Image: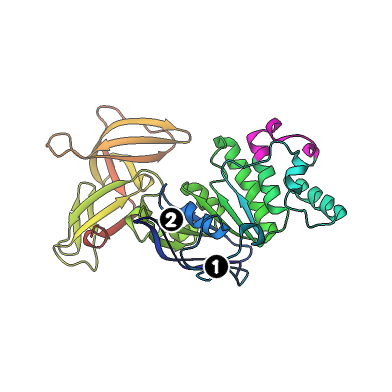
Amino acid sequence: MGLALQGVSHAYGDHKVFDDLSVTVSPGEIVCLLGPSGCGKTTLLRLAAGLEFLQAGTIKFSGEVVADNNGQIPPERRGVGLMFQDFSLFPHLTVSGNVAFGLTKMRANEREQRITEVLEQVNMIQLMDTYPHTLSGGQQQRLALARALAPRPAVMLLDEPFSGLDQGMRIQIREETLGILKVSGAATLLVTHDADEAMFMADRILIMGPTGILLQEGTPDDIYRLPTHPFVASLFGQVNRLSGVVFNEEVITPLGIFPALGYEDGCELDIIVRPDGIKLSEGGKYGVPVEVINARPVGPSTFVRFCTSVQNTSVQEFHCRQVGAFSTTSDSKIKAIVEPESTFIYRRDKFNS
């Protein structure tokens, strides 16, 4: 096992960040901690790195205890690579000097060879004599990655490493980083609040809720298609929220009737529908009549706001994403159909207690 945090608890004064939390990462695996700001993601990463004192539990690197109730090994002796969102580069050192910083125990010729290897990996060998302030944001990120990987750490810890990059650069750099991390074979724990980033980077995702509780763990596909908690279902952008009471294993809502198999009569349910799970059509035989409020093109799709009633006092607005162009006229008769695979049903008393 590359990295194991077992039964870890942490608090700041009376504020409990998390309690009895366990996380494992195998060699060569990338695990993403995904959750909102303040849920304890960075604290857990700092505990693994040795930058926070472990209050309870055990932390192991490659099967060896680096922190428990008997004490802890300092960060510089853990064999861990660290990469933070501000990169933390040394401005007075050149690119090669930054990479060499953690290689002091190597012989000179071995050190020079390793510097060349990692700079070639990140495509920066031609910049080895330049200084960090002359580099672009993407180049600084590559340098930070090269410096972290240079000592061949068994464990890599990354805290929001792409947050300082613009959108176009972020996509390119995270793809490069993914490939480099996989080649390194290190057990990688990456902290992010960006669901798309976690889906792209991770072999496995751990979802932390606002109170530091681990809500779900699984592959990116499992997390997206089979969310076990309403919070998890709503992580991937805006969603439509419905509610209703079960009668004869059905729930009547403004967007139609939903099956509620296995739920008893009178049970209150919350229903989440993703925007891309609602299809609008004109003059269709099936679906719920709706009135389009507005439609705005967003790249290759159209974002549509609509309501299910314009005459009674309980008008409810919804939104959906339609592939390609979408337009209507005042005479258009639009109907909405909800796709079951984009619909998630939760028992209210289980998650709101």
Question: Image height check: is 134 above or below 314?
Answer: above
Q: Is residue 112 left or right of residue 52?
A: right
The residue located at (32%, 41%) in the rendering is 280
Q: Earlier in the sequence, mark 2 or mark 1?
A: 1
Question: Image height check: is 286 above or below 5?
Answer: above
Q: Nearer the viewer, mark 2 or mark 1?
A: 1
Neighbour tally class for label 1: few under 14, some 14-19, many 20 plus, Cα within 10 Å: few
Neighbour tally class for label 2: few under 14, some 14-19, many 20 plus, Cα within 10 Å: some
Res 85 quadrant in image = top right
- SS under mark 2: helix
Q: In the picture, which quadrant includes the C terminus?
A: bottom left
Which amino acid, by three-letter code, is at mark 1? Gly
Q: Is residue 34 left or right of residue 148?
A: left
The x and y percentages for residue 119 are: 76, 46
The residue wearing badge 1 is 71
The residue located at (34%, 59%) in the rendering is 229
Residue sitting nearer the eye, 79 or 316? 79
Question: Magenta region, mostly helix, strand or loop?
Answer: helix
Residue sitting nearer the eye, 264 or 191? 191
Q: Please say whether residue 286 is visible from this viewpoint.
A: no
The residue wearing badge 2 is 224
Q: Which mark is residue 256?
A: none
Question: Image height check: is 171 above or below 153?
Answer: above
Residues in magenta?
A: 126-140
The residue located at (68%, 32%) in the rendering is 133
Which amino acid, by three-letter code, is at mark 2? Tyr
- SS under mark 1: strand
The residue located at (46%, 63%) in the rendering is 55
The x and y percentages for residue 336 are: 28, 44
Residue sitting nearer the eye, 27 or 291? 27
Q: Is residue 83 magenta?
A: no
